[in-house]
Image (cartoon, rainbow, N blue to C red):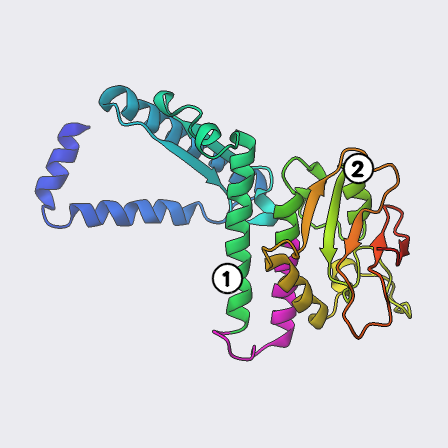
Amino acid sequence: MSKCYKLFCEQYPDTYKQILSVYKDTVALGNAEKTVAQRQQLFHSTSKRFTQLFNSVAKCHAFEGAFLLAGSVVNQDGGIGYMHTTPSAENFFLERCRADEDEMVGHFKAHIYSRSSLAMVAEAFDGGKEPQDPCAEYVLSLNYIANSLFSLVGRGCNWASGRLFPWKNLPKNLAKSSIVCYNFPDNVLFPGEERQPRPKGGSKGISDLTLAECGTLIAALTDKSKHGLHFVVKPDLHGSPIIYGAPPDTDSKHAFAKRMYANLKCDRHG
């Protein structure tokens, strides 16, 4: 093999690196269209190769390292994520970042899901201009909302790793996982809540949201302050509300925030 490589370099002294680079890109493009199962298999084989490479370099040359690997397609890659450290780098993330392997993978996936979704929404607005296709803007907005909620509650929740986001069953699923949502926008339809008057075709899940509601919800999801939408683990719920709405606007007819329970019942005692 080494002789073949040497002859190859001698035959193409000025372009052999470019040829090899193009070949690698071609192989990667050939693996682009895959089923979910094939994609998972590719991920596991890739992480295995990276692990072997890192360990080999650490053993032969004393180059220590750490890497995180995860897919960025939310509706396919919810169950795949991997982290590895070489022997002398063990516990680096735990000691320096105060996060174990599962937490680091979860944070990493949330980070790439968020950036991927934000990029898609930004494309819809064409650099700040009015979107040319309102339908595309709406679809991308729904996609961003689902991706963001997936990333916020996905770690450790099997129900949040499927292909479709369980919008109508979100309160019930949150209750099962002992998770409470805070600061859900007051003027946005709550998950599982039916719009009044009820549409003739019935509920359509997350598609019940209007474009304006999508914009309000995206603003709440991207708000990283204490007033933004966030989730908290609460081990002992005992019938307490699952979703706490944000305070109503000053011109609202309601004096108190809305709350929703696991059975989709709502009150205004927040």
Is 118 located above or below residue 150 in the figure?
below
Q: In terms of image quadrants, where is residue 60?
A: top left
Give the quarter of the figure containing the C terminus: bottom right
Q: Which of marks 1 and 2 precedes in the sequence?
A: 1
Name the amino acid type tagged 2: Lys
x and y percentages locating residue 31 in the rendered image: 44, 45
Mark whose residue sits in front, 2 or 1:
2
Residue in the picture at 51% in, 32% down: 98
Q: Residues within 10 Å of mark 2 (few under 14, many from 20)?
A: some
Residue drawn at (57%, 38%), measured in percent from left and top?
37
Q: Residue at x 40, y 35 (%)?
A: 67
Separation of residues labelled 2 and 1 (CA atoms): 32 Å
Work out whether 88 lies above or below 76: above
Highlighted magenta segment, given as a residue range: 126-146
Q: 173 or 162: which is nearer to us? A: 173
**Whole-percent x and y of residue 206?**
74, 59
Residue labelled with disc 1: 119
**Above or below, 41 relative to 16:** above
What type of secondary structure mainly makes up the magenta span?
helix
For the N terminus, the image quarter is top left
Residue 148 relative to residue 105: left or right = right
Residue 176's disc is 2
Label tally: 2
Q: Secondary structure at mark 2?
A: helix
Question: For the point 73% across and 57% down, which residue is it?
Answer: 184
Q: Of the numbered discs in the image, which one, if any, rests on residue 169?
A: none
Where is residue 32? Give x, y as percent: 46, 48
